[in-house]
Image: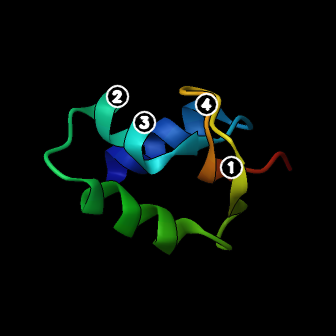
Amino acid sequence: MDRVEALITRLAPVPICDECIVERLNLAALHQASQRTRELAGQRGYERTTAECATCGESKSVVRRCPR
């Protein structure tokens, strides 16, 4: 789970979708990323919204770390 947060932080402030997180981190299942991104949403400067993923370019639910 720390790897998910670290990836999002490294990419800040660009958004990334759960599917791309799974692919980039070679996770076994989508729920591994989804669970962590839902936990981060609204906390410590993270937001989850519908937007274009910076990695795959699709409009879907994404997470990003907001600039301070």
Relative vertical location of residue 44 with respect to residue 54 in this rendering, above or below: below
Give the residue number, with chain letter if any, for mark 2. Answer: 24
Instruction: Tell me the distance, in whole angstroms, between the alpha carbons under discs 2 and 3.
Output: 6 Å
Q: Are marks 2 and 3 in contact (CB under 8 Å)?
A: yes
- Which label sits in the foreground, 2 or 3? 3
Q: Secondary structure at mark 4?
A: helix
Residue 51, x across and y down, in percent:
73, 48
Asked if residue 59 lies left or right of residue 1, the reply is right
Q: Earlier in the sequence, mark 1 or mark 3?
A: 3
Q: Dot 4: few (<14), some (14–19), or many (≥20) neighbours within 10 Å?
A: few
Q: Are marks 3 and 4 in contact (CB under 8 Å)?
A: no
- Which label sits in the foreground, 3 or 4? 3
Give the residue number, with chain letter if any, for mark 3. Answer: 20
Q: Name which residue type carries label 2.
A: Arg
Residue 57, x across and y down, in percent:
63, 28
Q: Are marks 1 and 3 in contact (CB under 8 Å)?
A: no
Give the residue number, with chain letter if any, for mark 1. Answer: 65
Q: Earlier in the sequence, mark 1 or mark 2?
A: 2
Q: Secondary structure at mark 2?
A: helix
Q: Are marks 1 and 4 in contact (CB under 8 Å)?
A: yes
Q: Residue at x 68, y 49 (%)?
A: 65
